[in-house]
């Protein structure tokens, strides 16, 4: 017994079983809460991104992740589209709110970014995100260095041209793809 | 060891020792006490006079203000830090003044006071004293300070900080030439770039002033001519090649040479004897690498100008270059002893 | 055996300053550098490490009689990984924002050398009381290390101290011509510079005291 494999490793086996059981218990207890946290991160943004929306549900469109934004009576009032792309430093992840026909942008929220603090990370500010509100999705948006004179112009952040252009580029690409995709 | 004459340490400390009965000192045995750290630093300050004139003409009082902040802060930092380390005061060698001046000339005109202040403290403290003082530092102190404040204060130091329409100076209303090229695709004329009537860091705008001061430094042998020569050749070659491959309208290799801080960096910063290689061969490598990195950063990175990072990267490579560029002694290479 | 080594109380005190994990043993550098740009992140990390350290030290001390020498590292790792996973899940469930900010650094506690070092050096050879006081002392020392670095970085980098939890603003928000937070302190270079300077300061004081 002393020299058999079991004799050597019984402690490891027993510990593994105990730890496995403990982890399973922790996981089952906490999983619903964690899932809820994650959903709240995106679904919770929907009412802010689409006016009149009370909640939403996940709806894949092609290979894009989108959420149907519903009002209190369950009527669809718009879309929230998840989009991501390369920024100045790292990937930028966005949520884009649109009306039901995907013709106008109703809101923009930055889920995740690692742009330069003090310059590029101003893309998360409401001051920048609000500039996208009410813009038509056609023609594509462009970044300008001055106050916008046309509907398609978005004033970039001073000193963070690349970050501003990245966000606008991600929005343009994702929205164009979404508009062309057949919706279920 | 011809390069040892350019190492300020050996020479500056020599006359201090009390004369013993018999002189036993390592080579070089011939020096007249002329080539001291102090003389070299005074030379650099003299060579900076044309740059100062061009800068005063272009940026007026802003130049005076930044120079005063940086130089005074550098002197205070030197006093405080040498005292903390319990060393003899080294204010007299003038190196702190030069570091402060180079730092000031590499800042935007309207940078707030704390940029120069903190930059100078970081330059002297983290760039020089923590390594053991002048002669021991791996990196050019002024560039360490500038890199720190560039990352610390992107709003006050980034490309947009150079444009200050409310400052009341013509030069400060447009973007710097390299930013204009990178972001807007606009080229600046060669004559303004050469004379320095463009926007930019305080000391970098005038290619003419940098050339005059730089040639003086090289003629006095305070700066090694190999480094700027190699850097200019490298930039000219790369820029010329890129110009042939994909021409940009109105932007030639002469624009690349005289635009931005390249000449200022090549003559005043890269030639710092402490943080550059010892041998002429090594200096050629150092200069060429510096020029190539400047072009790489200008064309391929998010930054419009790359002199500062190019200097710091090449500084880090100096120990390696020194190993590569060991000169062959008279009488052929030293035979390698076989060790087990 | 235990009569030769330091008493439990000495172990406790040793962990805090004389054998501080960050400044003296230079262990656990990854979280020290990565999560110290705010007090909240640093203290959450320190709390998670303390939980894992204390739990695994106690457990290893309890089963120390059963350990086989050649399988001990495996048992240590298994124990540590379990408690780290528990800590990670609890953070994700109850402190979701903080868990998102700390990202991979919570699972990375598994490879934090402080814990396996204490298991090996102390818990696997000492009784429960010694192991417990040792773990608490080391955890406090680690907390002290993280908090000191985070204090410097958060005050200089953001002008706040406990800015997210308590909203304390140390340096008033000034116009850019008067003062500005040092962005570099929030970024990784600030971590290296701060750690180096603080470690230098600790050594300087220690050398002065020794004289």
Image (tube, rainbow, N blue to C red):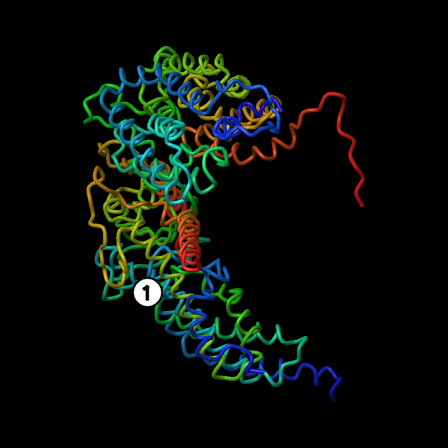
* Mark 1 Cα-neighbour bin, 10 Å: few <14, some 14–19, many ≥20: few
Residue C204 lies left or right of residue C3; in this view the side is: left
Q: In which quadrant is the N terminus of chain B drawn? A: top right
Residue A101 visible in image: no
- How many numbered circles are shown? 1
User: Extreme bottom residue here?
Assistant: A1
Decide: is C34 above or below A130: below
Q: Position of residue B18 (x, y in %)?
A: 50, 30
* Res A16 quadrant in image: bottom right
Q: Nearer the viewer, residue C101 or B321?
A: B321
Question: In this rendering, is residue C66 above or below A80?
Answer: below
As drawn, A96 above or below C44? above
* Chain for numbered disc 1: A
Residue B130, image x, y percentages: 44, 43
Q: Is residue A36 above or below residue B244?
A: below
Q: List x then y, in percent, for residue B286.
A: 56, 26
- Which residue position is annotated with label 1? A40
Image-quadrant location for residue B121 = top left
Regarding mark 1 in the picture, which secondary structure is present there? Answer: helix
List the single residue furthest toward the front: B21
Q: Nearer the viewer, residue B31 or C9?
A: B31
**Residue shown at 60% from the left, 76% from the top:** C75
Q: Quadrant of residue B72?
A: top left
> Residue A101 location, x and y as percent?
30, 50
Q: Is residue C145 visible?
A: yes
- C23 or A177: which is nearer to us? C23
| Residue drawn at (43%, 31%) of the image | B308
């Amino acid at each position: 017994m002393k020299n058999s494999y079991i004799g050597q490793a019984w402690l490891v086996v027993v510990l593994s079983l105990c730890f496995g059981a403990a982890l399973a218990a922790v996981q089952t207890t906490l999983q619903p809460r964690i899932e809820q946290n994650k959903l709240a991160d995106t679904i919770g943004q929907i009412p802010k991104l689409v006016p009149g929306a009370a909640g939403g549900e996940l709806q894949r469109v092609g290979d894009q992740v989108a959420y149907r934004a519903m009002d209190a009576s369950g009527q669809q009032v718009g879309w929230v589209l998840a989009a991501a792309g390369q920024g100045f430093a790292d990937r930028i992840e966005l949520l884009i709110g649109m009306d039901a026909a995907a013709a106008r942008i109703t809101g923009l929220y930055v889920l995740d970014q690692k742009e330069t603090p003090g310059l590029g990370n101003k893309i998360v500010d409401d001051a920048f995100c609000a500039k996208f509100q009410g813009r038509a999705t056609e023609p594509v948006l462009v970044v300008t260095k001055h106050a916008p004179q046309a509907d398609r112009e978005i004033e970039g952040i001073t000193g963070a041209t690349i970050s501003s252009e990245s966000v606008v580029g991600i929005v343009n690409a994702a929205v164009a793809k979404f508009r062309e995709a057949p919706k279920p | 060891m011809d390069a040892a004459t350019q190492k300020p340490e050996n020479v500056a400390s020599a006359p201090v020792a009390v004369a013993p009965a018999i002189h036993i000192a390592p080579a070089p045995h011939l020096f007249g006490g002329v080539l001291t750290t102090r003389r070299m630093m005074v030379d650099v300050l003299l060579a900076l006079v044309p740059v100062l004139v061009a800068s005063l003409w272009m940026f007026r009082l802003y130049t005076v203000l930044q120079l005063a902040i940086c130089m005074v802060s550098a002197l205070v930092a030197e006093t405080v830090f040498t005292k903390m380390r319990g060393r003899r005061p080294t204010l007299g060698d003038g190196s702190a003044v030069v570091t402060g001046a180079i730092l000031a000339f590499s800042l935007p005109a309207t940078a707030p006071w704390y940029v120069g202040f903190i930059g100078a403290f970081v330059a002297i403290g983290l760039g020089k004293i923590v390594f053991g003082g002048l002669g021991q530092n791996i990196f050019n102190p002024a560039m360490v300070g500038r890199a720190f404040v560039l990352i610390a204060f992107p709003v006050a130091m980034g490309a947009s900080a150079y444009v200050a329409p409310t400052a009341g100076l013509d030069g400060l209303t447009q973007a710097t030439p390299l930013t204009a090229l990178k972001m807007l695709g606009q080229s600046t004329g060669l004559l303004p770039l050469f004379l320095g009537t463009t926007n930019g860091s305080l000391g970098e705008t005038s290619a003419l002033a940098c050339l005059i001061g730089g040639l003086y430094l090289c003629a006095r042998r305070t700066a090694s001519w190999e480094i700027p020569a190699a850097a200019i050749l490298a930039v000219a070659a790369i820029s010329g090649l890129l110009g042939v491959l994909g021409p940009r309208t109105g932007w030639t290799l002469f624009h690349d040479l005289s635009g931005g801080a390249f000449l200022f960096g090549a003559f005043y910063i890269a030639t710092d004897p402490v943080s550059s290689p010892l041998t002429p061969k090594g200096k050629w490598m150092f200069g060429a690498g510096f020029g190539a990195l400047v072009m790489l950063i200008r064309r391929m990175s998010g930054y419009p100008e790359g002199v500062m990072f190019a200097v710091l990267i090449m500084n880090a490579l100096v120990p390696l270059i020194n190993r590569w560029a060991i000169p062959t002694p008279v009488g052929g290479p030293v035979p390698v002893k076989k060790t087990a | 055996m235990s009569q030769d080594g330091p008493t439990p109380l000495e172990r406790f005190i040793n962990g805090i300053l004389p054998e501080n994990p960050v400044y003296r043993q230079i262990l656990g550098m990854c979280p020290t550098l990565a999560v110290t740009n705010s007090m909240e992140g640093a203290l959450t990390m320190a709390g998670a490490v303390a939980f894992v350290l204390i739990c695994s030290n106690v457990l290893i001390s309890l089963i120390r009689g059963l350990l086989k020498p050649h399988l001990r590292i495996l048992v240590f790792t298994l124990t540590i990984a379990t408690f780290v996973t528990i800590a990670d899940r609890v953070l994700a469930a109850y402190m979701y924002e903080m868990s998102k900010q700390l990202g991979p650094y919570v699972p990375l506690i598994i490879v934090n050398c402080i814990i396996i070092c204490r298991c090996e050096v102390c818990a696997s050879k000492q009784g429960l009381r010694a192991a417990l006081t040792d773990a608490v002392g080391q955890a406090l020392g680690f907390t002290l290390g993280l908090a000191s670095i985070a204090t410097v970085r958060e005050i200089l980098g953001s002008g706040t101290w406990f800015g997210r939890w308590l909203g304390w603003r140390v340096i008033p928000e000034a116009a850019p011509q008067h003062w500005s937070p040092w962005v570099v302190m929030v970024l990784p270079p600030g971590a290296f510079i701060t750690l180096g300077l603080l470690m230098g300061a600790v050594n300087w004081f220690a050398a002065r005291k020794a004289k």
